[in-house]
Image (tube, rainbow, N blue to C red):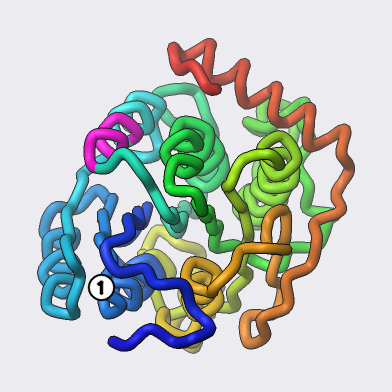
Amino acid sequence: MATSPAERNVRGNNFVFFGGSAGMGRAAALALARRGASVLIVGRGEKDGQAVVEAARAAGAVSADFLAGDLATVAGIQQVADGVRAWRSQLHGVLHTAMAAFQGKQVTADGFEFAFALQYFARAALNRLLVERLAASGDGRVVHIAGDVPGFFKPDLDDLQFERRKWGFFKSVLGTHILGFLHIQEAAQRWRDLPVSLTATCVNSTKTKAMADPRMPLAMRLMGQFGTTPEVSAANAVRVLTQASAQGLSGTVLRRPKRFEPQALQLDSGDAARLWDITTKLAAQRGLRLP
């Protein structure tokens, strides 16, 4: 696929898709493959992951590989980070789309509430573990797929695992998006002197494997059934990864899926800094050192 004048040339550049075995991650990976990028698909399912690898190669990827890993565990995060670092010395972009949810509260082996573990902690930890590889490319871009969640869903930073509060599906899942926004805002500030940008792109209901999971609440499954395609929902993420310049993108959120309108995140800076420290401590308690 020819490179548009409005895009950077990504041929041979290295991109990682966390949760790239299906849905929006798959759609974005194939969009980069058509531009001749090198792609790494990270996911749990070998069969689905290898199918995307084959499709990416057929689409024109310079190279395509699969890395198996469980992003809901601290050990899995470390294993995946090591695997990504072994894959390439430079990263030009990473996209986080991995998600899953349950009708009831689930706690991981690390003692984390499941949505917190997968949709917040894994993303924040991987960004920090891979920041040197991203900076080494001279233009490393991080994108989180998220939802345009109102601020009142911000979790209690003193009770992130719902040990005191009553657990609720929407409080849990939507709260992770707010935590992700806080992470992006704080990382953009801490890494302002590095050639690394972080952006969240919001999506509406999308027809994905995760949304059709029978463990999802019925309301979510119905929303997914009538949602848009993964390709449409991934469009802004692809644009962030491929547009000519990342200037003005770091520390922003694109709230409207059908418009490319980056807006600076302006959440409480004290909360953002505190969450960074909490994340560092939680990781250290489980044997993971975060830069």
Camera-nearest residue between 291 and 219? 291
Q: Residue at x 18, y 52 (%)?
A: 66
Callout 1: SS: loop
- Where does residue 22 sit, x and y in percent of width and height? 30, 67
Residue 53 in view: yes
Camera-nearest residue between 269 and 107? 269
- Where does residue 186 sit, x and y in percent of width and height? 73, 39
- Where does residue 139 sit, x and y in percent of width and height? 51, 53
- Where does residue 93 sit, x and y in percent of width and height? 44, 55
Q: Which residue is mark 1?
A: 36
Instruction: Classify the position of the C terminus by image quarter.
Output: top right
Q: Residue at x 53, y 83 (%)?
A: 6
Camera-nearest residue between 230 and 109? 230
- Above/below status of 30 relative to 173: below
Q: Is residue 51 left or right of residue 5?
A: left
Location of residue 1 by image quarter: bottom left
Q: Residue at x 61, y 21 (%)?
A: 280
Magenta stretch: give its range. Answer: 81-87
Residue 209 in view: no
* Amino acid on which disc 1 is placed: Gly
